[in-house]
DNA sequence: AGAAAATATATGACTTGTCACGTATTTATT
DNA sequence: AATAAATACGTGACAAGTCATATATTTTCT
């Protein structure tokens, strides 16, 4: 809808937009934001968890207690995001946290009964969403997609200096 | 690097991580964030523009003056992001803004000489980055990638209700 | 023309996410 | 054992992005 302008845009604008539509550096953030929005709306239907809360409860419910570092690694996000979200989740009694006795640096996070209840309210909604996605992409297409993302990720981990000093090879 | 743990993670954690690695809803935000970080580091080398500033100057330099709505459409982002960034850019004298005389709702944004200079400082760095990406993906692979993103995007525009009430078809 | 609907922009409140840096603890080195 | 290096986490500061809502201006409909 929003693409169809009632007023005629000038060609230079349309050209620019069309050109940018193949720019992965533009497309990925856009897709990611849209995905986040859709997830937030789904979670509204499933009890009102935030995305971070949902992901955390999901991981804990499926894989059991783990450290903040493990959660961040599974969710492919920064530990600080969890570090900030977890105290709030503990306040809501979704999780319990305690220092690891074998490694005093680590915090073990564990889901509570109330956390599991919240998870089970959201889970059917989120499962439907995943099923709906599987109706759009075949298994093979998902693997292609993921393979491209793997390669894109590894490109993104190239330090900026290496990208830019392509002449200065040692 | 961060994937290789010196301490042995339990299998349940590794299994969970591996399972989640094919979850597009996890992978896309991760790739997008990594892309943003890399861009920010590149822009540090190219004069210190923010991402929003860079995208805006790029569009204005390449396609000429346009409205906020046009910029948002090209950048596939929310207009409010631009709405907030532009006054700051005007203060830095990167852009000029004036009301459209033909449509008093619209604001026409135009690049200044100083804005163009900032653009030209950043542009070679960002061009190198795009070239580096083209060394990783063939033209055909990019098109495949973009095609998958198109389909993912259109899935994401499905309203949450439609996803969830798949039984209740009218 | 006048009322109603649509559009463009601004703004407050919020979420997700990064980075840099500090502290505590553990592991590695000498 | 003592020191150095690495690791886990917490936290401040900030960027990017969304949504809802308000306001001004056009457009459309009657």
Image (spheres, coloured by chain):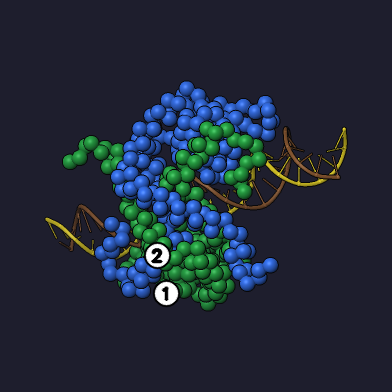
Chain colours: A green, B blue, C yellow, D brown
Q: Chain of mark 2?
A: A
| Residue B4 percent coordinates (x, y) | 28, 62
Q: Secondary structure at mark 2?
A: helix
Q: Secondary structure at mark 1?
A: loop
| Residue B60 percent coordinates (x, y) | 50, 31
Q: Answer with left or right where residue A72 lies relative to residue B3.
A: right
Q: Answer with left or right where residue B43 lies relative to residue A84.
A: left
Q: Is residue B39 visible?
A: yes
Q: Nearer the viewer, residue A101 or B99?
A: B99
- Tell me the tag on residue A140: 2
- Tell me the tag on residue A64: 1
What residue appears at the point 46 percent right and 74 percent down from the top-left corner?
A: A61
Q: Nearer the viewer, residue B138 or A25?
A: B138
Q: Chain of mark 1?
A: A
What residue appears at the point 60 percent right and 62 percent down from the top-left corner?
A: B160
Q: Nearer the viewer, residue A100 or D23?
A: D23
């Amino acid at each position: 809808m929003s693409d169809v302008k009632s007023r005629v845009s000038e060609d230079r604008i349309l050209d620019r937009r069309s050109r940018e539509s193949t720019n992965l550096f533009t497309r990925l953030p856009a897709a990611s934001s849209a995905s986040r929005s859709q997830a937030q709306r789904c979670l509204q239907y499933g009890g009102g968890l935030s995305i971070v809360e949902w992901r955390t409860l999901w991981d804990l419910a499926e894989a059991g207690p783990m450290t903040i570092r493990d959660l961040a690694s599974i969710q492919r996000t920064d530990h600080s995001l969890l570090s900030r979200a977890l105290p709030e989740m503990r306040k809501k009694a979704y999780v319990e946290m305690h220092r690891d006795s074998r490694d005093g640096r680590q915090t073990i996070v564990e889901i509570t009964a109330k956390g599991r209840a919240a998870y089970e309210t959201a889970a059917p909604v989120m499962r439907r969403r995943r099923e709906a996605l599987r109706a759009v992409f075949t298994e093979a297409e998902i693997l292609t997609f993921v393979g491209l993302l793997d390669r894109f990720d590894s490109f993104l981990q190239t330090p900026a200096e290496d990208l830019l000093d392509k002449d200065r090879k040692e």
